[in-house]
Amino acid sequence: MSLIEKINSSTCTERFKNDWLRIFTCPVPSSNFLSFVAVATIDAPQHSVLSLLYDVDAATEWVWKTREMRVVQELSESDGRVVYQLVSAPWPVTDREIITRSLAYMDPESSEAFIKIECLPDFLPENSSYVRVRQMEGAWNIVPLSENSCRVIFRLHIEPAGEIPSWLANIAVIDTPYHTLCNMRDMVKREKYRKPVAAPFRSTKDIMRNYEDFVVA
């Protein structure tokens, strides 16, 4: 069972709530760094959100503190894609580089999309100018609610590596989902994301759905 699957709503704390977004922080066993679960209602079709997520080149416009994001390698349809991300850290902390593989799934009955993100820290040689993140797990679930709205669940845990105090990193546990999802809410309205993306999804009923308690709480 992955770390994301182990997140238990009973140990999490709601840290932010408005009319369309809720953010929870959750302790992680054997870690000083919190994970988060963010649940958002987006007034846009599901395919618009998926188009934005697939458009890696645009990530610097909406993913919080991202200086660079690019596709390193497109794998086979069943193996996803490898992505490089460079994240700005507050001075005097060194910026972080993250290499991940994303795998996309879709439930053939409900049309819920699920994108699993896992860390591949040794896929590229390390750059001495940055700190390489070696542990990270994340997931996106995009659930259609109507023709023009969807629910987005964003979960993430990251061990930032290097010398960084947990209190400083844990501030970003709120800022990252808040600003990222606020930016997403604006970005999906752009004309370029109105057209469905031709991205490969594995068809499966086996989608990670341990977020229901956060939706109804």
Image (tube, rainbow, N blue to C red):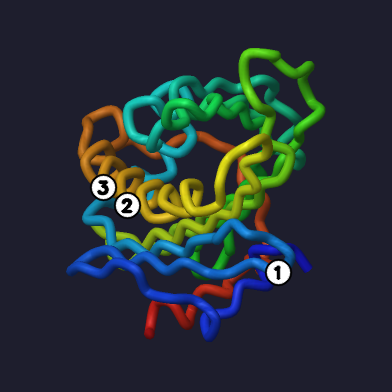
Percent across and percent down for residue 83 are 62, 28
In the rendered image, the vertical position of residue 31 relative to residue 44, given as above or below: below
Residue 180 vs residue 83: left or right?
left
Q: Helix, strand or loop at disc 2?
A: helix
Q: Residue at x 58, y 63 (%)?
A: 108
State which mark lies toward you, 1 or 3.
1
Q: Name which residue type carries label 3.
A: Cys
Numbered label attached to residue 182: 3
167 or 63, nearer to the observer: 167
Residue that carries the numbered disc 1 in the rendered image: 29
Q: Residue at x 37, y 65 (%)?
A: 23
Q: Helix, strand or loop at disc 1?
A: loop
Percent across and percent down for residue 136 are 66, 47
Q: Name which residue type carries label 1.
A: Pro
Q: Helix, strand or loop at disc 3?
A: helix
Q: Residue at x 64, y 67 (%)?
A: 28
Q: Name which residue type carries label 2.
A: Tyr
What is the spatial separation of the Cα atoms under label 1 and label 2, in whole angstroms? Answer: 24 Å
Which of marks 2 and 1 precedes in the sequence? 1
